């Protein structure tokens, strides 16, 4: 670490060995902080930990794992209770660790989850540091949009209060897209707070092989549309099975779905029920395998349920751009991703719920992939380097944390 580097605490509920997009982003953020001469310490809950705390070294990054309750892959009621307890258990075990008296030049925390505000506030207050909240989705708003929560019901109100508490801790909030900024307009008008667009980011991929071989299965010889990531309610992937069924007679087009989530098994069973020979499902793979997977494919799928009123640019869009894959995106109206895709000519985007429209887009894209693959790949890679590198993200966050480093509430 250079003498001018900052000591940064990163608080999150995901980090490797977890394979989620959030874990990958936080890995890349921490490693890039170190590369730029800062010292990062990641504080992350660990439900299976035998002791209260454990310090690991992750490729030069210090990771403090703090024992917590299980918050992943459990029922909603149990998860909610565990997440309420999360920051308090983390603080309790932090006070028992060798880092209990550590002081920080800046605090970064990552949402989702919305429950880490008390932990971030404790670190910020003890060090007199500025705090930067990275928001990747706006909860509970998106859950209400999906019908998972009744807007203005008691659970919604409770989650809203928790979310607003974490906003109150932040000096700077980094949102995914310009369309998210109006949501925080009133928040930003108080004191010295500020809100800015912090694009998603990815580090350069590590060369690795992939356990999935497309040519060894029923998609051999086809132009493959791939979706890799979470398959839940928010993604609205059902329409892509309808799309695959509509294109079943096209022997040159196939669909590959890789990942996990609440709807993964349901979608897989539905594809089997419909006897869709042009659709293949695989369980999630290590993120390091993703570039080698995409090297076997031709188009990346981005899917967001059109009922969303908040906006985001999914991490998988970055991985597609990084791999030179054009995208077929079905997203919610007003999403900034639409203009980004069309302006930079890196794919097709639609807000339609019409299978017919998506079919026409696929047929156009398959033609473009065949005729213009080298130019399309170059545009995808150029967009990635311009907006979505970890280097760009870290420089932006450090600038925000350093702006008035002594002015922390």
Image: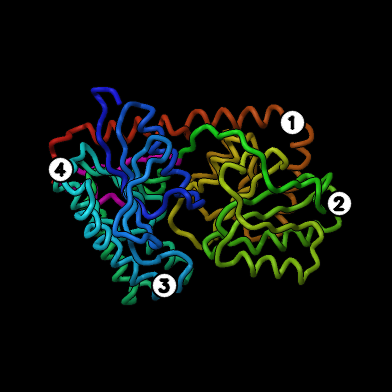
Measure the C-alpha gap from mark 1 to mark 4: 54 Å
Q: Report which residue position mark 3 lands on.
A: 149
Q: Residue at x 52, y 61 (%)?
A: 234
Q: Residue furthest top?
A: 3
Return the mark for residue 251.
Answer: 2
Task: Report the number of numbered marks.
Answer: 4
1 vs 4, front mark: 4
Rendered location of residue 331, percent (x, y): 56, 53
Q: Report which residue position mark 1 lands on.
A: 372
Secondary element at image label 2: loop
Is 254 a magenta residue? no
Rendered location of residue 32, percent (x, y): 40, 32
Q: Residue at x 75, y 46 (%)?
A: 213
Q: Is residue 239 left or right of residue 339?
A: right
1 vs 2, front mark: 2
Rendered location of residue 196, percent (x, y): 33, 40
């Amino acid at each position: 670490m250079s003498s001018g580097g900052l000591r940064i605490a990163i608080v999150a509920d995901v980090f490797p060995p977890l394979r989620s997009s959030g874990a990958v982003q936080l890995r890349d953020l921490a490693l890039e902080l170190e590369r730029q001469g800062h010292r990062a310490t990641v504080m992350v809950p660990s439900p299976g930990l035998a002791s209260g705390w454990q310090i690991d070294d992750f490729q030069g990054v210090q990771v403090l794992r703090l024992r917590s309750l299980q918050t992943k892959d459990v029922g909603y009621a149990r998860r909610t209770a565990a997440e309420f307890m999360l920051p308090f258990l983390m603080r309790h075990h932090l006070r028992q660790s060798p880092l209990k008296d550590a002081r920080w030049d800046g605090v970064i925390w990552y949402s989702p989850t919305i429950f880490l505000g008390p932990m971030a506030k404790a670190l910020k207050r003890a060090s007199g540091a500025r705090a930067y909240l990275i928001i990747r989705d706006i909860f509970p708003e998106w859950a209400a949009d999906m019908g998972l929560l009744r807007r203005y019901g008691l659970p919604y109100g409770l989650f809203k209060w928790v979310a607003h508490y974490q906003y109150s801790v932040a000096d700077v909030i980094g949102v995914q897209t310009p369309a998210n900024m109006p949501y925080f307009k009133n928040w930003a008008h108080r004191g010295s707070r500020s809100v800015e667009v912090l694009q998603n980011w990815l580090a350069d991929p590590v060369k690795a092989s992939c356990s999935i071989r497309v040519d060894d299965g029923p998609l051999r010889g086809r132009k493959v549309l791939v979706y890799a990531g979470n398959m839940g309610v928010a993604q609205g992937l059902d329409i892509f099975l309808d799309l695959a069924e509509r294109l079943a007679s096209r022997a040159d087009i196939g669909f590959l779905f890789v990942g996990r989530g609440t709807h993964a098994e349901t979608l897989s069973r539905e594809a089997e029920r419909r006897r869709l020979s042009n659709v293949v499902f695989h369980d999630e793979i290590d993120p390091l395998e993703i570039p080698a997977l995409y090297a076997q494919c031709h188009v990346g799928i981005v899917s967001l349920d059109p009922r969303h009123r908040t906006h985001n640019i999914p991490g998988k869009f970055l991985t597609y751009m990084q791999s030179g894959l054009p995208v077929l995106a079905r997203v919610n109206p007003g999403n900034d991703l639409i203009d980004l895709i069309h302006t930079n000519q890196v794919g097709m985007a639609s807000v339609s719920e019409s299978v017919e429209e998506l079919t026409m887009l696929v047929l156009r894209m398959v033609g473009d992939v065949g005729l213009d693959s080298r130019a399309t790949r170059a545009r995808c890679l150029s967009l990635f380097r311009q907006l979505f590198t970890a280097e760009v993200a870290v420089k932006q966050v450090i600038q925000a944390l350093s702006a008035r480093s002594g002015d922390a509430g």
